[in-house]
Image (cartoon, rainbow, N blue to C red):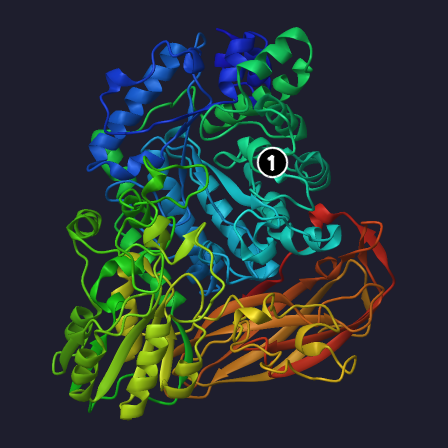
Amino acid sequence: MNDYLNPELSPSRRADALLARLSLEEKMAQVSCYFVPDFTMDPADLPRTDTDYAYGTGQISCLAMRDLKTLDQVTTMQRAIQQRFMELSPHRIPAIFHMEGLCGAYAPGATSFPSGIARGASWDPQLERRIASAVGRQERAIGISQTFAPVLDISRDSRMGRQGETYGEDPTLTAAMGSAFTDGVQSSRPDGLTTEAVAKHFTGFHAALGGIHGANVELSDLELREQYAKPFQAAISEAHLRGIMPCYASIRNEPASGSKRLLTDLLRNEMGFDGLVVSDYGAITNIHTVQKVTESLAEAGLRAMEAGMDQELHIRSAFNDELAEWFRSGKADIAILDRAVHRVLEAKFRMGLFEHPFALQGEELLREFFHDDDADVTLRAALESMTLLKNDGTLPIASETRTIAVIGPHAENARYLFGGYTHLSMAEGALAAMTSMAGITTADDSGAGTFDTLPGTPIQRPEGAQFDAILHRLQPKATTLADELRHLLPGVTVITAHGYDHSGTDESGFDEALRVAAQADLVIATVGGKHATSSIASMGEGVDATNINLSPAQERFIELLGETGKPMVLVHMNGRAISSDAADRHANAILEAWNPAESGFEAIARTLTGDYNPAGRLPVTVPYTAGQIPLYYNHPNGSAWHQGDSVGFPEYVDSPHTPRYAFGHGLSYSTFAYEDLTIDNNTDVRAGDVVTISVTVANVSDRDGEEVVQLYVRDRYASMTRPVMELAGFRRLPIAAGERRKVTFELKTSQLAFLTVDRQWKIEHGAIDVMVGGSSQSPELTGSFDIHGDAIIGGRTRGFYAGSRVD
């Protein structure tokens, strides 16, 4: 037996053995990717002797799986494609099949999960691990061995269309959620086939200037490492993250995909990453064509590979024949290519691809793909994401209510439940007149301006039989919000009206909607945008905005409805949180529902009726306007609304410095009280110790509920400018009516380490303030402890978030 075929050897040794046998052409094949243009094609039309793929390929892009109608088609095509490329490879090297996994697989019958920011609002890493386990299990079953998730971006700019993919603005929350997701994807190994997570987008992506996708980032080295790289480090250190995708942006004028400083010095040498680095679609090409850093594609390819990029996705462009000749002639060092190929082969051996290259079939596929509790997991995720921002007692819906008016486009069509990077939004995106996805082009992008748009916008009107057909095919059980309310409130009359569009200025539906509202005891108006992809979206990849508020028509309708005096509940759906002056003035209650996916209407209705008691908490700070951006709670001392007495004005001349809604904010139908904050050994803590912090939380209402207990810390005085406060730990905690529960956090002092000017991680002596409560805005209890002595520690092994237990 050839050594590389011996499963008893380590993946690294097997990679050594196979690499030694490969020709230059085979090596170049392993760093390339084949983009399947149409998964419905006849397998006979797949490449046979095409010069670009004559020796196989390293990766297969599965984006086009979104178009298949049955699971059998998916697995049949995966097996056919894999077989073809193994036949092309002289050593029968199987390809890695990759797929997005943020919200589930793009496959018929796959479970769809709420958007990343919705799950960030749950503050529930345990549930996030279950979600990831389901995603990984379903993708492995259909032959996917690389899952593009979690998204570990820190997002502090709601103008950027991709905020909805993230867990929010905080590195501690994102570290906990992202590590849980990574562990969930990579932990289960049915039949020896392993899926590896690819975290994205390394790093600082959402700090792009102007909130523009892929624009230059001007973060300092310290901020980049302390804030933006922290979730990646946590996933590497705690969950052994196996994959990284660099971002499209330039980081201080150096393309991330061609930066040795980022991909080798920081990622591998400092952070200890030992897995596979794959490019975002077209990102290496961008080094030459967009960022204009190199004079040719081959030069861009060499720069990227030398920097630490291992594979080029989604097509072969910069890792091209010219670069191959440079390796052949010695113009480029062959050791650079060998290093990348070794990492690719080692990953394939880790994944078990040589033993299990194909998707499952028949009963084995059905057993693995469909689990009874998957529906329960996505419903639980939708429920836990529900975030009650405002309530004067109008919610839950009163028992004496007899007629409810449900108004708005989001309430009448389940397509609005699904955010970007869901199967539904990607399938819809194929119908869009223009694409907004980086690296992907439509057949005719010259169609700009020729399609029907929403008045006052460049956004394509997302209506028509084709769009509805996709919804009914992918979500045949889809209902409406009115349907779910009728089910839960059988004695109540529910009437409906469209009212307005998700974007734009059209007021033609106002009269009918106001007439319907006049007949009701309570009005529920759904507002927000269309978080999706391409020209049908108002927010998504490449769909950025300067206005983070509601559309003009929606703002105006809220004003008009408010003048009627009818009790008004707003339900907001989008990839960014609601920010509305009219809502603040007129709404009696506001429920932030994000994009809650296939169980969304049930989750919303159960929350409105009180069948479910909401406990979602904002994972972002919500500004009044985009003019306040960037606005985030853990800003440095002397910044934002903590500027102190350094200047004369405590506010902008036309707006507050403070946010509309604070990070961690969220209401409940229960009332909670915090008691008995205890900090063990608070006067004798040494650098490197663990500090135990306990608090009792009481439900002082007559309704069972959940509280998200939030632990914040502040370095009172330090040798570097530190944040005014930082989330250190949290625990989502069910508490029955009248019950008291004790939460104990174990805070490593290494979590308080910060980077010095010479980039050393330092635990510094001094007083640390402790704040515990239900949001960042008004922690109920405070205390402190003193650290004695200093210590320089390793960044890989520092604490990332406090562990907790419930007594």
Comparing 387 with 786, the one in front is 387
Comparing 469 with 474, the one in front is 469
- Residue 613 is at least partly visible in this image: no
Residue 397 in the figure: left or right of residue 200:
left
- Dividing the picture into quadrants, the one containing residue 537 is bottom left
Counting the numbered discs, the total is 1
What x and y, as percent, mark residue 47?
34, 15
- Residue 753 is at least partly visible in this image: yes
With respect to residue 635, does 135 lie above or below?
above
With respect to residue 668, does 122 lie above or below?
above
Q: Residue furthest right?
A: 789
Quarter of the picture containing the C terminus is: bottom right
Say which residue appears at 36% left-offset and 11% top-offset.
87
- Dividing the picture into quadrants, the one containing residue 521 is bottom left
Q: Secondary structure at mark 1?
A: helix
Q: Amino acid at mark 1?
A: Ser
Say which residue appears at 26% left-offset and 55% top-offset.
462
Comparing 741 with 535, the one in front is 535
Q: Residues within 10 Å of mark 1 (few under 14, many from 20)?
A: many
Residue with the mark numbered 1: 257
What x and y, as percent, mark residue 271?
69, 42
Say which residue appears at 53% left-offset and 18% top-offset.
320
What x and y, as percent, mark residue 125?
49, 58
With respect to residue 356, does 462 lie above or below?
below
